[in-house]
């Protein structure tokens, strides 16, 4: 699938009261991503918690990869 094709798809879905969507580069999504990935308690069973800078860079890298 090409990036322009993926951008045309509505990736949102809802299950009960939970609505899911892809993250974007908004301040709110960036704050959420960084807060989760930099929190040792959240990351306990996932992996090592990142620094705030590393988490922000990781989101930027992921968004850039998805945009291609």
Image (spheres, helix red, strand yellow):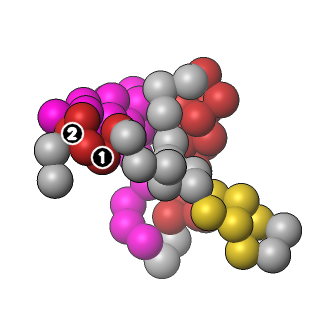
Between 12 and 18, the one lying in front of the other is 12
Q: Secondary structure at mark 2?
A: helix
Q: Is residue 48 left or right of residue 16?
A: left
Relative to 47, residue 1 above or below: above
Between 57 and 51, the one lying in front of the other is 57
- Residue 31 lies, in percent from the top left, at 61, 32
Which is the main secondary structure of the residues drawn in magenta?
Answer: helix
Give yes or no for residue 63 being in the magenta stretch: yes
Relative to 60, residue 7 above or below: below
Report the disc number at residue 6: 1
Q: Is residue 5 left or right of residue 47?
A: left
Residue position for label 2: 3
Residue numbers of the magenta segment = 46-68
**Label 1 crowd (10 A; few <14 / some 14-19 / many >=20):** few
Residue 25 can be seen in this image: yes
Give yes or no for residue 26 being in the magenta stretch: no
Q: Quadrant of the C terminus?
A: top left
Task: Tell me the residue at 43%/71% (across/down).
Answer: 46
The image quarter in which residue 2 lies:
top left
């Amino acid at each position: 699938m090409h990036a322009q094709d993926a951008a045309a798809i509505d990736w949102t879905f809802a299950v009960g009261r939970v609505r899911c969507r892809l993250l974007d580069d908004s301040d709110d999504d960036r704050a959420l991503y960084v807060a989760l990935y930099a929190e040792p308690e959240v990351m306990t069973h996932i992996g090592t918690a990142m620094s705030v800078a590393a988490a922000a860079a990781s989101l930027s890298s992921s968004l850039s990869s998805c945009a291609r």
